[in-house]
Amino acid sequence: MDPSSHEQQIRNLLYRYMEATDNGDFDARAKLFEHAVVRFPEPLGAISGAAVAESFRSRQRLYDGIPRTAHLCLNVIIDLDETATSAEVRSRYLVLQETPDLPLQPIIVGRYHDRVERVDGKWRFAERQFIIDLVGEMSAHQNAWVPPAATLRDRQNAD
């Protein structure tokens, strides 16, 4: 298979996550990570399996079943290994939100550092690290407060 085809399949995996998130489809979102470790900033830390779905469900605010967000995946860099069985993927995310009480606005910007693997001809997440760089008005997005980006950067730099 042409490397560009693998790269497009990997991009599609990233985009499926964004689509499931904006649709409020927690099960589809968690299924994407059923074989992966997901690393969130503290205090959440690393989780996997059913804990991923519960983490998404417990923190997300919904409006008529959806979060009223648009998750954008930008600047995707894919480093495919020579055998096309794994890849390191770095990307940026931008989340926009509009609610009945808030106008459309950017609410958070960060990075994903992913490791993906190809098993039985299909690409799947093996690991995801969430990095938060900029934080806006998050009160309408999550039930749990997200610390300011500067605090998160200080914690991440200490690691």
Image: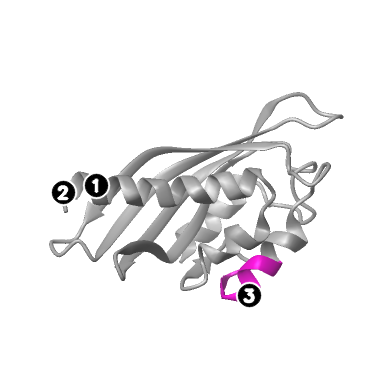
Circle 1 packing at 10 Å, graded few (<14), some (14-19), many (20+), is few
| Mark closer to the chain start, 3 or 1 | 1
Residue at image mark 1: 5
Horizontal arrangement in the rendering, residue 1 relative to residue 34 (left or right): left
- In which image quadrant can residue 1 be found? bottom left
Amino acid on which the number 1 mark rests in the picture:
Ser
Whole-percent x and y of residue 67? 73, 43
The answer to whether residue 45 is above or below residue 123 is below
| Label 2 residue SS | loop
Q: What residue type is labelled 3?
A: Ala
Picture residue at 52% right of the left edge, 71% below the top: 34
Residue lying at the far top in this picture: please name it.
103
Q: Where does the image place residue 118, in percent across and percent down from the top left?
A: 30, 66
Q: Please identify, in this view, whether the residue under mark 2 or under mark 3 is nearer the observer.
A: 2
Say if residue 132 shows up in the picture: no
Q: How far apart are marks 2 and 3 (CA)?
A: 34 Å
State the residue lying farthest toward the left: 82
Asked which quadrant contains residue 94, the reply is top right
From the viewer's perspective, tell me whether residue 68 is left or right of residue 34.
right
Circle 3 is placed at which residue position?
Answer: 50
Q: What stretch is highlighted in magenta?
A: 45-54
Asked whether residue 151 is in view, the answer is yes
Q: Which of 17 and 127 is in front in this view?
A: 17
| In magenta segment, residue 100 | no
Q: Name the residue under label 2.
A: 2
Indicate the position of residue 5 as horizontal and vertical percent values.
24, 47
23 sits left or right of 36 in the view: right
Q: Look at the numbered discs 2 and 1 and tell me whether their residues touch, using CB distance below 8 Å.
A: yes
Mark positioned earlier in the residue sequence (2 or 3): 2
